[in-house]
Image (cartoon, helix red, strand yellow):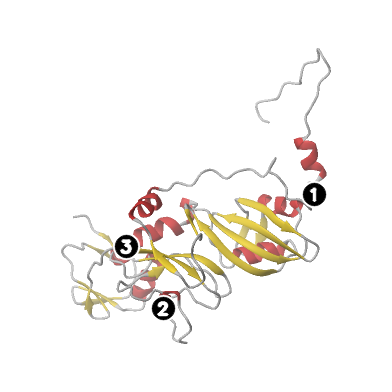
């Protein structure tokens, strides 16, 4: 059997996500054939090599998948020396060693996938796959369609330029607004930071969807297992291309910008007059 990277083998057994497994190796907690390893890369043959973590032989667990509605104040980590509430603590009765796929900060609530399937976790979190994640944000002040267009064009963060995949105004009033934003990347506290860039502090943030999965039917702190059809759908899921905002309905109480109005206004030509030909570079 061809050799594989050690962190991939560890993740495949359900120990943790691949990135977390890399840190476990670097912390010196893994041994291969009785020899401690604490650097990368390491290639192993899982059918031949004897791998142990914290002195215990590595054993594959059956793959399990759960959706959790993470409440506020709960942390997305399996190791917390300060003893703070963890997402994994909410999964009462689950015997397998599951971990959160991606992270929500402590103040953000909503949909969180918990599993021991490292390969699926890699698929859902790696930026190259572009899995959409949708958030509903309650913010201070009135959000305009022009500001959401700015988010689509991109705003600069410390790591570089970032842009949203989709953005919709759900409600807009003078003192507060509700918007839904879909991202296809996963930078730290990204939704809060990009909304702050356009002048709106987030009061409440909920993740309502990950790819084909939604939060529907789950109250804060509740969880449920994924059905076999949901697991199959998630593994085969390929995100659709981002939808453009042009021409989308704007909720009552908001206004389109002048440029949006002109783009969506029907164009009329004088009878017998031919429209100008577009160049191939338009």
| Disc with the residue nearer the chain's start (3 vs 1) | 3
Q: Is 280 placed left or right of 120 in the picture?
A: right
Q: Quadrant of the N terminus?
A: bottom left
Q: Secondary structure at mark 2?
A: helix
Q: Residue furthest front?
A: 217
Count how many numbered circles sit on residues in the image. 3
Q: Camera-side residue: 53 or 124?
A: 124
Badge nearest the viewer, 3 or 2? 2
Task: Tell me what residue is drawn at x 22 percent, y 70 percent.
Answer: 59
Q: Which mark is residue 89?
A: 2
Task: Tell me what residue is drawn at x 51 percent, y 77 percent.
Answer: 74
Badge nearest the viewer, 3 or 1? 1
Instruction: Give how far across and how far down residue 212 sits, in percent.
Output: 47, 52
To which residue does mark 3 refer? Answer: 8
Q: Secondary structure at mark 1?
A: loop
Give the distance between the C-alpha atoms of the residues marked 1 and 2, in whole angstroms: 45 Å
Q: Which mark is residue 255?
A: 1
Q: Quadrant of the C terminus?
A: top right
Disc 1 crowd, CA 10 A, few/some/many (<14, 14-19, 20+): few
Instruction: Give how far across and how far down residue 133 sits, in percent.
Output: 53, 57
Q: Is 216 placed left or right of 270 in the picture?
A: left
Q: Quadrant of residue 34?
A: bottom left
Give the distance between the C-alpha atoms of the residues marked 3 and 2, in whole angstroms: 25 Å
Instruction: Give how far across and how far down residue 262 sits, in percent.
Output: 80, 37
Instruction: Give how far across and how far down residue 53 sits, in percent.
Output: 27, 76
| Disc with the residue nearer the chain's start (1 vs 2) | 2
Task: Tell me what residue is drawn at x 71 percent, y 53 percent.
Answer: 148
């Amino acid at each position: 059997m061809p050799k594989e990277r050690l962190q991939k083998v560890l993740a495949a057994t359900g120990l943790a996500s691949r990135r977390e497994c890399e840190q476990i190796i670097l912390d010196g907690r893994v041994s291969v054939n009785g020899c401690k390893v604490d650097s990368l890369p390491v290639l192993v043959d899982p059918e031949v090599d004897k791998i142990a973590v914290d002195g215990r032989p590595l054993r594959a667990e059956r793959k399990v998948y759960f959706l959790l509605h993470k409440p506020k104040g709960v942390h997305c980590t399996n190791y917390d020396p300060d003893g703070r509430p963890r997402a994994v603590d909410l999964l009462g009765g689950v015997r397998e060693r599951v971990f959160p796929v991606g992270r929500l900060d402590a103040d953000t609530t909503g949909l969180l996938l918990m599993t021991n399937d490292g390969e699926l976790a890699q698929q859902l979190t790696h930026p190259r796959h572009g899995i959409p994640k949708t958030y509903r944000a309650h913010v201070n002040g009135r959000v305009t369609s022009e500001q959401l267009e700015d988010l689509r064009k991109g705003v600069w963060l410390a790591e570089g330029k970032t842009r949203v995949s989709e953005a919709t105004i759900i409600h807009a009033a003078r003192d507060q607004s509700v918007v839904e934003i879909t991202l296809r990347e996963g930078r730290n506290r990204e939704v809060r930071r990009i909304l702050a860039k356009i002048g709106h502090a987030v009061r409440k943030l909920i993740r309502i969807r990950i790819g084909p999965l939604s939060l529907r039917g789950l109250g804060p702190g509740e969880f449920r297992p994924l059905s076999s059809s949901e697991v199959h759908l998630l593994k085969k899921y390929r995100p659709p291309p981002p939808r453009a905002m042009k021409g989308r309905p704007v909720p009552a109480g908001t206004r389109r910008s002048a440029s949006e109005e002109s783009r969506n206004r029907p164009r009329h030509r004088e009878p017998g007059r031919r429209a100008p030909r577009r160049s191939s570079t338009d």
